[in-house]
């Protein structure tokens, strides 16, 4: 059974700092990996999708990398802003399946 | 930008009552999903739906749950006889195709069972 772990559970950084969020998964037979943002009491906003054949994806200040063989992904946020404060979720799509398996998330606070 | 919508945003019900949660997926999407998130826990997959039938379901999705696409736009999740442990945020999602595509999530329905 796929297990997804995100470390740290919470992170606080000063505005302007670059930061990295980590995601690890136990089964490397994945189809894709998706990073989401969740604001308190709200839905999930898709940030980036990396296919299993890709190494990284970029969108604006966000860069996500994938190392399938080691079961790891990172989300790099450049020049963090207070508006980036949210919980960031990593979710893995399994080969041959439609479901996403989620990590518990990293709660990010960017201090002005 | 097209988005997934869900109604109601909040629902309070008594244990044993039936509830129907409604979703309008993005219009050109063909795959639909329900997930739930119990407070403080991970988002969990419930079911996926394609071509008017369930394509995959988790062990959580037992006989008290059902899904339906009653018309060309709505996608519903019915819980027949709610239990206290059904209290959670329920998310609907849709994707253009299955497997490799981005899943887009709605804002969720917060269900409280008393």
Image (tube, coloured by chain):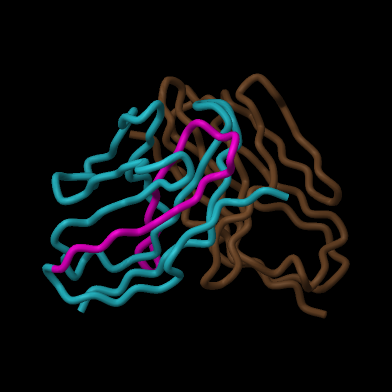
Chain colours: A brown, B cyan
Q: Residue at x 63, y 57 (%)?
A: A37
Residue at image coords 58%, 67%: A10
Q: Quadrant of the C terminus of chain B?
A: bottom left
Quadrant of residue A40 in the image?
Answer: bottom right
Q: Position of residue A1 (x, y in %)?
A: 33, 34
| Residue A9 on image: x %, y % | 54, 62
Q: Nearer the viewer, residue A20 or B75?
A: B75
Is B41 on the left or on the right of B73, as rendered? left
Residue drawn at (86%, 48%) of the image: A60
B3, above or below A107, in the image: above
In front of the other: A9 or B11 = B11
| Residue A8 belongs to the span the image colors magenta | no
Q: Is residue A26 left or right of residue A23?
A: left
Who's the residue at 84% across and 55% down the image? A78
Q: Horizontal and vertical percent for residue A112?
A: 82, 80
Q: Is residue A91 above or below residue B52?
A: below
Depth check: give the residue in front, B31 or A35: B31
Count of all numbered marks drawn on residues in the image: 0
From this view, report whether residue A1 is shown above or below residue A59: above
* Residues rendered magenta in the picture: B17-41
């Amino acid at each position: 059974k796929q297990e997804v772990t995100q470390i740290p559970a919470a992170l606080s950084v000063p505005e302007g700092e670059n930061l990295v969020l980590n995601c690890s998964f136990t089964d490397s037979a994945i189809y894709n990996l998706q990073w989401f943002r969740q604001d308190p009491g709200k839905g999930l906003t898709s940030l980036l999708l990396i296919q299993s054949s890709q190494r990284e994806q970029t969108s604006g200040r966000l860069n996500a990398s994938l190392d399938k063989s080691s079961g790891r992904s990172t989300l790099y946020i450049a020049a963090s802003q207070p508006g980036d404060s949210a919980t960031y979720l990593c979710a893995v799509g399994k080969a041959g399946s439609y479901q996403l398996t989620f990590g518990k998330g990293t709660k990010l606070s960017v201090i002005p | 930008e097209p988005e997934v919508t869900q109604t109601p945003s909040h629902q309070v019900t008594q244990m044993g009552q039936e509830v129907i949660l409604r979703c309008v997926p993005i219009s050109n999407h063909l795959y639909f999903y329900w997930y739930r998130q119990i407070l403080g826990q991970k988002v969990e997959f419930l079911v996926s739906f394609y071509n008017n039938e369930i394509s995959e379901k988790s062990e959580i999705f037992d006989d008290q749950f059902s899904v339906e696409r009653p018309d060309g736009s709505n996608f519903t999740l019915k819980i027949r006889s709610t239990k206290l442990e059904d209290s959670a945020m329920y998310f609907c999602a849709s994707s253009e195709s299955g497997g490799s595509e981005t899943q887009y999530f709605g804002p969720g329905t917060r269900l409280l069972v008393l």
